[in-house]
Image: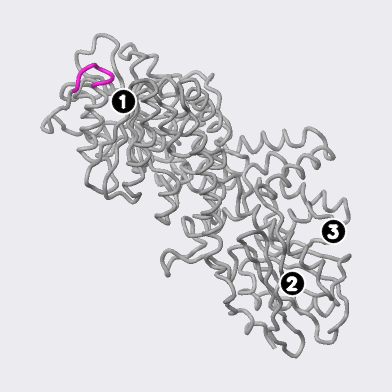
Amino acid sequence: MGLAKWETVQVNTFDVRGQLPLYVEEAARAAAEAGARKRDAIVDPEALKARQQYIRESLERSLGGFPSSDHPLRPVVTGETKGNGFRVENLIFESRPHVYVTGNFYIPDGRTAPGGAVLLLCGHREQAKHCDEYQTVCHYLVHAGLAVLAIDPVGQGERFGYYDPETGKAEVTSVWEHERVGRQCLTVGDNLARYMLHDAMRAVDYLLTRPEVDPTRIGVTGHSGGGTQTSLMMMADPRIACAAPGGFIMNRPYFRMTGKTQDAEQKWPGFSAMGLDHEDILVAMAPRPVLVLATTYDSVPIEAPRQVVESCRRFWTLHGRSEQLQLFEDADVHRFTIPLVRAAVAFFTRHLLGKSVVPSDGEIHLLEPEELWCTRSGQVIGEREGAHSVRDENRERLSEAAKLRSRPGEAEQRRRGVEWLRERVMYNRHPYPLNPRYYGAGENELLSATRTLWWSQKGIINMGYLFRDQTLQGAKLPVTVAVWEGGIHSLSAHEEWIVKTCQSGRTVLVANLTGVGPLLPYRNQPQDDPHHPFGVLDKHTDELMLLQDSMAALRTYDVLRAVELAAGLDEADGEDLHLYGSGRYALYTGLAALLEPKVRKVRMEDRLESLEEWAGRREYDMTDSLSFLLPGMLRYFDLPEMDGWLRNEGRLDS
């Protein structure tokens, strides 16, 4: 018998593998054009100021709000090192309760009065502030007469969140720590960037306490991931006098051309939907001085920063300061090169010291990394009692969300939860006819199969198989819509269930939702695993989240449309519709059932029991894990609550 012969079908009628990239691109381009029109409408300083306020408020909303800055910093200098012409204080301050930020404060010799200072934010280097690349930046700046504070971002330097003091090792660091915990943060509507940005803002708070620092003359710079943090500061913190973001300023249309994904803190949910792009990072600073640092052979096309800088220059011109926005390029690859460093030093000394100074290369003598450690062991976890990682902070956020969502009582919570879910699933969807197509696919000794294509929405086609018991041909049968990972490519794994369900007198529609089975998008590299973190599916899911959408919302909408298709089949009992989900994708069937009362029963097997439990885990399989996340869902309900609502209605088949 076997269903394997139906697993390898290809869809030749439409380019279904190219549809998701095209759908995302068209939606993203429309959002970018809407944002450009808003920027084009800015013709005077008052309108510019209003846009800047909108940018700050929108960013805060996108990241899940900013943590409170009321907590005392409690700075401690743990050591001091003398350099040639400067000294370095190794310090720790508490940005939030039990969150310890490690940093090096470089002070030029002879600094007797408040002067200019630069906050250096490190990119994705495991050693962060004490690696050669970022030490070099600090040395050039301090030799030029600037005070410098370099801090470790979460997951880097002395702040590994998955560090085990017993073994002296960390499970993951840097990018992989950011991605692991960053996905979990999404469940409560947060973004990892809220924590990294807040640490940087508290670093400015610390600088304001230092007698060596003039509060009106604080600059910020960083490259790559540090360029991301610098950009966040440019939008969020008006205390920054000037900024030199490196290796990050581009815009979304150019970045999508690269086929790449970004790190967790670089993807801000809803940012594109709000009409914002990298141009707005610069707009937020106008008319304060900005030097964009770029390398000609970066992974992001150099045309991107060139275009963004030129398109934004007019916002400085509104204030008569067009020369205050500049671009400096170095013909190199993605790194904070010495020419970039020297350009940044000239920029900061001009605007923070009133004179352009660039030290000679011969003055730069780096320190040993251990000389810059703020802890004895090299890590705050295990050494500072009760030290929190972002994972700990997110668990607290999970607990807060659970208390808040249950406060109104079950009935009101259900009303709010379903209302929110409907808004997310239906966001930016427009009525579109199903226009189904049916193709005979064959039969075996037990079942007949019909291949089916239909439109889920404009630009998105879904497809699947209709299976029926051969002895029931011509009968009007109830329908069960089935959803699982792999879709029709995984028929053999679900053969027993399909046969049993058909023999019970039901038609089974095995649905391939967007990006599933034969609808899987083209891969950038044929050997790549499309479901792997940073793979092609993550790329499109990231872009959907920037557009206030998600793969989970899109696929839940697909399920609703599959139910609509099933209800309209000629040989279907539209009054007896069931949903069946298996594995992680079973979530979509439960969410669809909440929104569609026509669904009489829903059965979910081998599904996550609780999103809150998953979001609190120390370890989990990141493969395809973005696909089942609706950012912010845990502010409204968790899966046990969804199950309870369906059970109370008599629709949960357990």
Specify whether residue 545 is painted magenta: no
In the picture, residue 488 is in which quadrant?
bottom right
In the picture, residue 14 is in which quadrant?
bottom right
Q: Residue 37: x percent and y percent?
A: 51, 37
Residue under pointer 3? 598
Assign a secondary structure to mark 1.
helix
Residue under pointer 2? 509
Determine which of the numbered discs, if any, sits on residue 619 in the image. Answer: none
Q: Nearer the viewer, residue 101 or 573?
A: 573
Q: Amino acid at mark 1?
A: Gln
Q: Please indicate whether residue 378 sits to the left or right of residue 653 in the image.
A: left
Q: Earlier in the sequence, mark 3 or mark 2?
A: 2
> Dot 1 surroundings within 10 Å: few (below 14), some, or many (20 or more)?
some
Q: Quadrant of the N terminus?
A: bottom right
Q: Nearer the viewer, residue 315 or 649?
A: 315
CA distance separating discs 1 and 2: 61 Å
Specify whether residue 353 is painted magenta: yes
Q: Earlier in the sequence, mark 3 or mark 1?
A: 1
Q: Residue 569: x percent and y percent?
A: 81, 72
Residue that extends furthest to the bottom in the rendered view of this protein:
445
Residue under pointer 1? 324
CA distance separating discs 3 and 2: 16 Å
Q: Amino acid at mark 2?
A: Leu
Rendered residue at 78%/56% (across/down): 593
User: What range of the chain is rendered magenta?
Assistant: 350-356
Colour setup of the view: one colour
CA distance separating discs 3 and 1: 61 Å
> Do callouts 1 and 2 mark residues in contact (Cβ within 8 Å)?
no
Q: Please indicate whether residue 626 sits to the left or right of residue 152 in the image.
A: right
Q: Nearer the viewer, residue 48 or 615?
A: 48
